[in-house]
Amino acid sequence: MIPELGHFVLALAFALACIQAILPMAGAIRGHDTWVALAKPAARVQFVLVVAAFLILVHAFVSNDFSVAYVAHNSNTALPTIYRISAVWGAHEGSLLLWILILSGWTLAVTIFDKQLPRDFAALVISVMGFISMGFLSFLLFTSNPFDRLLPAAANGGDLNPLLQDPGLIIHPPILYIGYVGSSVAFGFAIAALIQGRITTQAERWIRPWAICTWIFLTIGIALGSWWAYYELGWGGWWFWDPVENASFMPWLLGTALIHSLAVTEKRGAFKNWTVLLALATFALSLLGTFLVRSGVLTSVHAFATDPGRGIFILMLLATFIGGSLILYAWRGPSTFAGGTYKPVSREIFLLLNSALLAVATATVLLGTLYPLILDALGLGKISVGPPYFNMVFSAVMLPLIAVMGVGQFARWKSDSLGRLSRQLKYTVTAAVGIAILAMVMLGGHKTISAGVGIGFGAWIMLTTGLGIRERCRNRQRPWFTLLHLPRAFVGQCIAHVGFAFTVIGVVITSFYTVDVHQRLAPGESASVAAYDFHFIGLQTFEGPNYQATEGTFEIRRDGTLIATLRPQKRLYLVRNMPMTEAGISPGFTRDLYVALGEPLEDGAWSVRMHFKPFIRWIWLGAMLMAFGGFLAVFDPRLRSPAMTRRNALVTTSATG
Amino acid sequence: MTPKRKKRAVIVASILVGMGLATALILTAFEKNLMYFYSPSEVAAGEAPTERKFRVGGLVVDGSVKRVPDSLAVEFDITDTAHEMTVTYTGILPDLFREGQGIVAHGRSRPDGVFDASEILAKHDENYMPPEVASALAAAQAQ
């Protein structure tokens, strides 16, 4: 009975989404105030209903209700409770419901924090989000109902994919989804601006924290995914240019371009068109990402074949949102937003250059991700695009981007001169080149030049960030006071940029100096990996809640000193009869040591995978710094409350006047 | 042309040239790294390239997996039910590599017809069949 209630609640939520989508928009355009006033209550009630539906599905999982088909396919009585809850979003239907839950959560937040917006504008944003909700709820109800019954009920469930039974995967999907779905706020903002034909300064200031929040969640979500792949897939890789990863990376790239372009739009009134286009494209890629990952297009062509309805529905939804918004943009965009004057050498131009480079990077990833799918769909052959393509093209775009980024965070708004910039930056350039050469000398090896260049570029970001801070404090009466009272958004920017430098350096060193050893080892034997000695002590077996494990013990020594004892496991998950590798990792600031069991060979020996991974933690540490920097920027009081800014502005005018 | 216009034309032209070059580089890199998929039947018919890397896929034939003692070298046959071919690989096989399982291999064809794999993929789901393998099997059965 309860699952039917869930289905009914979802249908009600769909009805409310229709009200939330259609009436406020019609009201805002035609001037019916009562219709406009419906936006908020409709969104709030819809949120309550979606939460109820979600909780009902959670209840079905926790209480092992195997008469619900979705539960029967993705859970099992032996599954620990925490994984029964995360199994809710372990497959297509439930993850769509989670998507809708998060969308209505973001909408609820918009209904609460909209004080700075004109009422009609806020209603339009909420209405656009209602349209998105309508699309997804109808997709869920008509093609992917999570409450469908299985008759007769299964005696026990098919279990959650063991790969997903991991603490990292409890939080990774929700956080990534919060990031994906958050871009719908900026999308609603862009559409509302296009419909109204103008953007007010308040609206520009209002959207920035939302765009940054979205970006923070995407950053954390992607970093978590990369970290999970590193320790759970057992290959020691942290990024594979897999379509699923690219799907989350593309909105991140464009989201990065968006928050930078927004800074220009808000501060200088320029690039309004470009900002609006970026907001539309970021959401479009988030939608594409959701569908690539969850629709089954990627994992199996069969999902499409057995349920063509689903595939067609997806394509129609994508076409409606992407096509519709682009048509609206082509119609209303170019004529509406002009403004902002700047010279060819100014911070505006450097920021524009960088967001253009980010867009190019996105386009290259999109080409490599979609082209094989399109060829396949057209029946023109089955191809795949290898990681070398992405590595080569992506680093080719990143180098100019980093070069420009250094100049950009130092250049002045509105107008600057190449003479001043080159005078100020020549020592920094020399220092960065010096660091690159020093790195080449110290590191050695056959990849020296590329690694040195990469490290030099990382150093360039850090040095120019420092220079930017000095520039802010110099020529002030009390430089130390200024340093300690820098605006939070500026501090956040600096931390995020330094974080990016950490990631760049981590990526470069890990890529060029990882040592991989794949070797046959019997208990008692050792292998040497870089400067370390991996000694295979022995094996033991034990039983987990829903798996059997074989655990190896490895002692790792350097020059005879014991560094770590690692216990990698090979698990066999019994329900699906599926083996899994749990790597043993000794983490460190400058290096990770990594052991994974391959497979048993003759005479008690195993194939063993051993890695020395220098600076790999810097990749995720950098991502965390980027997220933290964004966090500081969101909580900059100047961004959040326009009233306060106005008061500050008054104080300044009265002080100077 | 006035000097100002001339300057502007130079800027526009250099941007266009730069973009053209970038596009050409990207597309070259793209073309170089494309890997086509061939089924064992297509390989048997001589359709697969000899110079560049490509992908093959099929079911691992029961009883065909042979290991070389004291090393990580392994040799096995894959089939699309119409034709079989031999694959060699040195390294650690994925968790889900089993006889009867659908797998995809990246690598090159050796002159003796054996496929020298540099990477073996078996996806993390026991019901999962790589789509290429599924359609190769369907094509072989249709004949």
Image: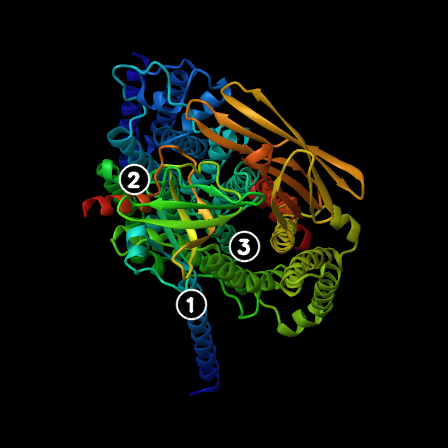
Can residue A12 be seen here?
yes
**What residue would you read off at disc 3?**
A267
Mark 1 vs mark 3: give the one in front. Answer: 1
Can residue A117 be seen here?
no
Residue toward you, A573 or A318: A573
Picture layout, residue A213 above or below residue B30? above
Residue toward you, A241 or A201: A241
Residue toward you, A285 or A29: A285
Picture layout, residue A603 above or below residue A657? above
Which residue is drawn at the image coordinates 62% and 59% (left, top)?
A: A409
Q: Which quadrant, please, contains the N terminus of chain A?
A: top left
**What residue would you read off at disc 1?**
B28
Whether residue A487 sits left or right of residue B17 in the image: it is right
Among the two numbered marks 2 and 3 on one chain, the one whose residue lies closer to the N terminus: 2
Number of other residues with Cα within 10 Å of mark 1, as a class: few under 14, some 14 to 19, many 20 or more: few
The chain under label 3 reads: A
Mark 2 vs mark 1: give the one in front. Answer: 1
Could you tell me which secondary element the residue under label 2 belongs to? helix
Whether residue B84 sits left or right of residue A410 in the image: it is left
Q: Residue A25 carries which label?
A: 2
Q: What residue type is labelled 2?
A: Met
Q: Which amino acid does label 1 sit on?
A: Thr
